[in-house]
Structure formats: C-alpha cells, structure tokens
Image (tube, rainbow, N blue to C red):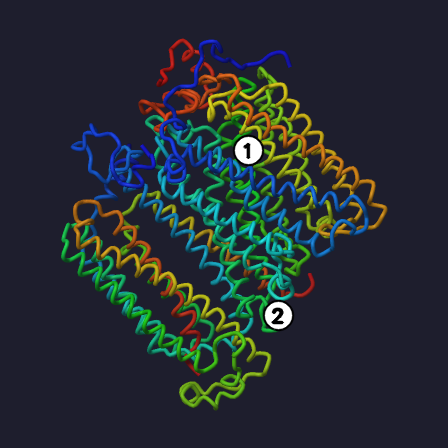
Amino acid sequence: MTDQKEMEEAAHHVVSPVIYIIVGSTLLVLTGATVWASYQEWGNFNAVAALAIAVVKAMIVVLFFMHVKYSSKLTKLTVFCGLFTFLALVGMTLADYFTRAWGRW
Amino acid sequence: MSDSTAIAAGAHAAPDHGHEEHPAYLRHHFENVEQQADAAGFAMWLFLLTEVMFFGGMFTAYLIYRNWYYPAFVEASHQLNIFWGTLNTAVLITSSFTMAMGVWCAETRKQRGLVLCLVLTFILGLGFLGIKTVEYKEKIEKHHVPGFHYSLQSFTDPQSDPEIYNEYHDKPLALDMARHTEVYFSLYFAMTGMHALHMIIGIAILGYMIFRARAGAYTAGHVTFVENFGLYWHFVDIIWIFLFPLLYLISRHQ
Amino acid sequence: MSATIVSLPDQSTARIPKVNFITKENGLLSWLLTGDHKRIAVLYIISLTFFFFIGGALAGLIRLELLTPQTDLMATDTYNKVFTMHGVIMIFFFLVPSVPATLGNFLIPLMLGAKDLALPKINLLSWYLYIIAGTLAIYTMATGGVDTGWTFTTPLSTHYVNTNVLTTGLAVFIAGFSSIFTGLNFIVTIHKMRCPGMTWFRMPLFVWAHYAASILMVLGTPVVAIAIVLVALERTIGIGVFDPTKGGDPLLFQHLFWFYSHPAVYIMILPGMGVISETISTFSRKRVFGYTAVAFSSVAIAVFGFFVWAHHMFIMGISNYAVLVFSLLTMLVAVPSAIKIFNWTFTLYKGSITFETPMLYTFGFMGLFTIGGLTGVFLGTSGTDIHLTETYFIVAHFHFVMVGGMLMAFLAGVHFWWPKITGRMYPEKISQLAAVVTFIGFNFTFFPQFILGTLGMPRRYASYPPEFQVLNVFSTAGASILGVGYLLPILYLTWSLKYGEIAGNNPWQATGLEWQTQSPPLTENFPVTPIMDHEAYDYEWLEKQKEIEVPSVG
C-alpha cells in the first residue's frame, strides 16, 4: 500500500511559487556564470566547468520545475534509467574513439 | 469500454452510467482518477526518455568531433553571437519559469493566472525562435551553412571577417582543419534545428492549451495535460541548457 | 502422441459466446477507430502476416538465385535490393512487432486482470504508424528498392548509391515510433494497471519478457532514429558528419545504428521467450522452474544487451581495446539466455509432457535457439569473428535465433492462444504436420549455411565459387520445404475460423487469468475485476477452480 500512498502524495504535492522563483533566478545567475567562465583561461578545466554548471542547471530544472524531488520512487528510477542509458551510449562510444590512437598493444 | 464511439464522439455508450461516482474525464479502463493521472505522467516521462536518447546520438557525435577537431570547433564557435545566445538562454529559462507557474495556477485552480502564464510562455517561446531566425539568417549570409555553398574563408583567412577577428584574433587554420569547421556547423544546425523543431511543436500545443485553458478545461481538477506538457517544455529547456555551453562557449578566451 | 491435455466442451451444445469483443460492434470504422487492445492485436496479426509473406517471397528469390553459382536469375544490383528489402521487411515489419504487437497487445491486459492497456489511443496510433511505414516500404520496393543492406552502412548509403535510401530510412523511422509507443504502453500498463493481488512475482513470465523488451524499445529505438536522420541530412545536404573528406567518421553511423540494432535482436527474441515460458509450463503441467531466475534474466538480457553493440563492428575499424571490452561483455550477455534454457529444461524434468502443436514448436525453439545462441558466442569471440564475420556463418547464426527461435516461438504462441482469440481450435493433426515440416525445412535451409560460412562463402553475394553449389542447393531445397511449412498454418488457421471446434474458456487447462474468462473475451475482458490470490503457474489452484463454474456472457 506504500505505492498507493506515494502515488497520492506525488499527485497532490503542490510546489510553491517561491521555490520556482529561487530556481529560476539561480538558473539565470548560473547562465551568467557559465558565460563568464568561458572567458577565463583555465585550459582543460574550462570544459569541465561548463559541463558542471550545465549539469547543475539541468538538475535543478529536473528536481524542482519537473517536480522529481517530490515524485514517487518510480519517477526517480525512470529518470535515472534514462541518464544511465545516455551515459552508456556516450561513454562506450567515446571509449572506442579515445583508444584508437593508443597504437599497438 | 474502449469502443470506437467513445473515441469518436467522447460520449458514453451506457446511459445509466452513474456519473456522480466519477468525473467525466475518467477513461473507463482506469479504476480511478489517481491511477489515470499517474499512468499519464509516467507515460510522459517514458516519452522524455526516448527524447533523451534521440538527442543523445547527436551529443555523442558532437563530443567525438570536438575532441578530434578542437581548433576548428573553437574558431567556428566564435562565429556564433554570444549576446544572442545568452539572451536566448535567458528567454528559455524564463519561459520554463512561466510554465512552472502555469502548472501551479492549474493545480490551485487559478484560471486567469494559468492563461496568463501560458500566454507568456508562448510569447517567450516565439521570442526564442525569432532570435534563432536572426542567428540562422546571419549564418546563411556568411555561407556557414554546410553543403554546397559552404565557405572556408572565415577560417583560412580570419582577418577577412573583421567583427569576429577584432574580438578573438583567431589564427588562420590549415586547409584540412578549416574543412572540419563544416562538421561543427553540421552539428550546430542539426542540434539547434532539432531543438527548434521541438520548440515549434511545443508552441503549437501551447496555442491549443491557451484556447482550452480559457474554456476552463484545466482548472477544474484535471491538470494532467498541463503538467505533462510542462514536463515536455522543461525537457526542451534542458536540451538548450546543454547546447548553449557546448556550441557557444567552447572557448571565448584567446 | 496419444495423450493430450486438450479439454473441449461438448461440441454438440457448445457455442461461441454471443457477446464478445468481435461481435460487440460491427462495421469497418469500429475496427479502424477502435481502442480495444484485442481488436488492435487482430489488426496487427493481419498486417503482419501480409508483410511476412512479402519478406518470405523475397527470401524465395534469394534462394532461387543462389541455386547456381552465377548471377543468372537477376542482376547483381537487383540481388542487392532483394536481400536488403528482405532484411528490412523481416526485421522492422515482422520480427520486431511480431509477438509484442499481436500477442502482447492481446494478452497483457488479460494476464494482468486489466480492462485495456494504459493508453488505448496511443496503441491505435502505433498500428497506424506501422501501416504508414509499411506502405512506404512497399512504395520503396515498387520504385526501385534500396540496395545498401538492411544495415545502411555509411559511406555506401550516404555517398555511393542512388537508390531509395531516404524513403526506406523514413519507413524505418516511422516503424520505430510504432515500436516505441507499443513499448511505452506496455511499461505503463505493467507498472500501473495490475489487478488487486497481482504482485510483480505473480505475473506470468510472458509479461516479464515483454516488460524487458519494452525497456529496450523505449531506450534503444530513438538512437537508430537519429542515425537515420543524420544519414538523411548527409544524403541531402552533405553535412559531413559521416564523410571522411570533410572529417566525419563513417563508423559513427555504425555505433549509433548498432546501439539500437543489437538491443533490437533482444526486442525480437524476448517476447518469444515469454511465449515459451507459458507453453512449456502448460504442456509439462508444471510450474516454470526458477520463476525468479527467468524473470530477472529477462531484465538482465535487456540491461546487458545495451553494452555489447560493437561486436557487430569488430572488423570495421574500432580500436583493439574496444574489441576486447565488447567481446568480454558479449560473453556476459549469453549467460541470462542460457539460464532461461536451463530453467525451461528443468521445467520439463518430471513434468507430464504432451506434444500438442505449441509444444512441438517449443521443442523446436529449444533446440534451434540453443544452436543459434551458441554460435553467437562463437561470433562474440573476436578471434573467430574475424574469420566468420560477413560470411554465411553470420547468416546462419541469426536465422537460427530469429527463425528457428523467434518465428517458432511466434507460431507456438499463435497456436497456443488461437482458441482464446477466436474461440475455435485449429485442426490438430495438420498443425502438428506443419510444425514438423517447418522444423525439417528449417534445418535443411540453414544448417548448410554454417558450413558454407566456415568454408568462406561471403554473405550478400549473388555469385559464388562453384565448390559451394551443393550446399546452396541443399539450402534452397530446404527453403521450399520451409515455405510449405509456413503456408499450411495460413490455410488451416483461416479454415478453423469457420469450421474449427469450439474451444471453450480453457482448452489447454492452463493457469493464467486470460484462461479464466470466455473465448473470445469480452471487450472489457472480465465481467468483474479479478483478484489474484494465487502464485503464477499454480496447477493446484487450477484443480480447485475446475469445480467452480466459470461464468460467461451470452
């Protein structure tokens, strides 16, 4: 019956506009941050920073705008599965490309 | 009952149905409204998973070629206007905010608020597409659209493009590396084009929703459509959240 | 074959129930605009059979050409088109939708005690997308065909052929969405619409298999969709993403293509494995051995299946390290399949086995899928793959798993649930004959191809060295027998629609909620929502049920 209760909670939870305002402003600030970061000379770290900021932005959109933080375990599992498969595609394909130049055994 | 009359006319076949027991929008193969809403939300999430994998293929291509042809990608990305890109990102984020507020209005049964939020989201979405059009037009004029008319001149001879050159002082690329800028633009147009297509579909659905919201369809307790569309809209926003740094912000320093 | 578990009602008084999903409404529109999962399943059965025979005719042409070493029946280009269209149609328009769209659509709500799938309109949309895609595929054939092989390998498909790559690509793209929507529907239904008491581990293994296949459909198909879009852009605008002269990598297409197409083979086989779980239990009168292991191995196949795709690319130019990793992972993915075969075998042990037609097909599956799967492990070993790839060994391998495995499972399922869908039994003797003929024809057709492959005959070649002719003639002879074996069911199943014996609710004395309601079922499946109070494959519970009359309408 916990599934049923979770389902009802997820269906009835209303996220307050205050949260939305905080999240929205954070997103705008982070956008500014990522633009600023691209003008800095951080070498390889530039790419890491850009991706990290993008990941944080995506996470708060998923958790708050898309209500995943207040959703059932199934929803969270679903999001995870999508991410996992995406990473498998990208990771294992890139693994081929990155190791091509490794020369002979 | 899942017979064709129910689909075609939305009417109920059995007159002695007992409608007091459940709302009219409950489809009969569901036990109750919660199950129906839950199933619909889950289905939307699964659909978004397919979209993640769909864009995933292009992100994979992008990561490979950025790694192989980094100098070409850097110089090609300088051709994108950072002001328009940042503005577009802000526009889309704001539209995500207005969409989230729209869902809140639907949940709290504020019909006028809902219509306002949907209209704002609609306008912001159109704004995004308008800016994209401006950007695309510039690319067309400068012969940076992959295909028959693609021109390497901005990359083999950066000084021929004073606006960009004064900002970034790019070095001229060797001919083979310059050719690889076409791969960058291919991915740029494929990814932003696919994203724009999803925006267009979203905006069309928004138009329909505004029309229905004004008739009170979503503020009587049946918020599923608005909620699930919100999920779609936020997803399109997330795609742009990644496209923006990957395409525009590869390296803006010298 | 004297013993049988078939138990039919008294034929002199038995009637098909007057109210059922077929008689509920009349008229073409009531079928074309239906939301009833059972009607949609029937629509799919008809369309699928149609495409199967087109694909089969193309196969016949291939085998006819290969009777002689020279290209005397058709030009080489034409031969390329024939095997390409055979592959495209058989894979995308027959195998991928076969069990899920027909038996899955029909049975999953019944097996779960639900009134319909979660999204009936999406279900109907799925069928329309399938029809549109199929029409496009036929149009492609009529206007010159495509000759790249079903794998659309770049840069051949993007730069070097003038044939209908775009139209075929579009057809596959649309068919892919049909598949995605079916899978999506199943996942939502299985999670959200089980009847009271139907826990995950009381579901029939048929449902578990479809659940796993649906995950693959939802997560894998979009990747081939984007691969096709990129090929289309490459062909029309020349974007350069697969073009070496512009810095692109043709191998990227293969990565994206096989990322789907390997899970696709599991999309194709898992539902068939679900059927086998049901038939093997029913015809051994025994619970499936190791239910949990079979259930989890279905999901394991789905998960591991995502990590092995580059074993189709060992010789294509991927790095040695990628070859190593993917070869290792391929060894892992064989394990869950093997677990299933062992568990089914143990189900047979000390069971009361009878040899009705579905069981004959099941035995055929067990043997042929094992051989096919084993040869898959041979191919997964990168060392042997280098010699065997792109030869007839591969052709034999995938036909053993797909035709000897999947198609036999499909036929087992069609025969097993035919009485439930139509209310009538098919004629037993001729159906058993057809099963045996199919098995013999299959072995004659495809076993020689293993030998041909190891001897070095390449695949996709219209002409070959004369020393290979004997085996090819064997193979073609087998194909003619196989054709007879596949034609017979069409004839007697159609005959049975009018003249078959009335089946009653549960002719096989099977467990499962679908057998506890009338044949054909009501539109809403059950007069009262069932409550699942027993484990799956509970034959003791079934014994107790026989003492209670099962109500039916009309």
Residue under pointer 2 = C244
Q: Nearest the camera: B182 or B23?
A: B23
| Residue C75 screen position, x and y as percent | 74, 55
Q: Is residue B12 left or right of residue B188?
A: left
- Disc 1 element: helix
Q: Mark 1 or mark 2: name the one nearer the start of the chain.
A: 2
Are dots 1 and 2 on a single chain? yes
B127 left or right of C351 in image: left
Q: Residue B108's spot in the image, x, y percent?
A: 15, 50
Quadrant location, the N terminus of chain C: top right
Q: Quadrant of residue B244?
A: bottom left
Question: Looking at the picture, which amino acid does disc 2 mark?
Answer: Pro
Vertical arrangement, residue C167 with respect to residue B94, above or below? above
Can the viewer see residue A31? yes
Extreme residue in the front direction:
C27
Instruction: Judge whether C81 appears above or below C401 on screen.
Output: below
Q: Amino acid at mark 1?
A: Met
Q: Chain of mark 1?
A: C
Task: Answer whether residue C220 is visible to the viewer in this image.
Answer: no
> In the image, what residue occupies the spot 53% across and 48% down?
C306
Identify the residue at horizontal 36%, vertical 21% (top origin): C533
C410 and B105: which is toward the camera: C410
Name the residue nearer the viewer: B133 or B171. B133
Point out which mark residue B12 bears: none
Bin the neighbour count of mark 2 within 10 Å (Cα to Cα): few under 14, some 14-19, many 20 and up: few
Residue occupied by mark 1: C273
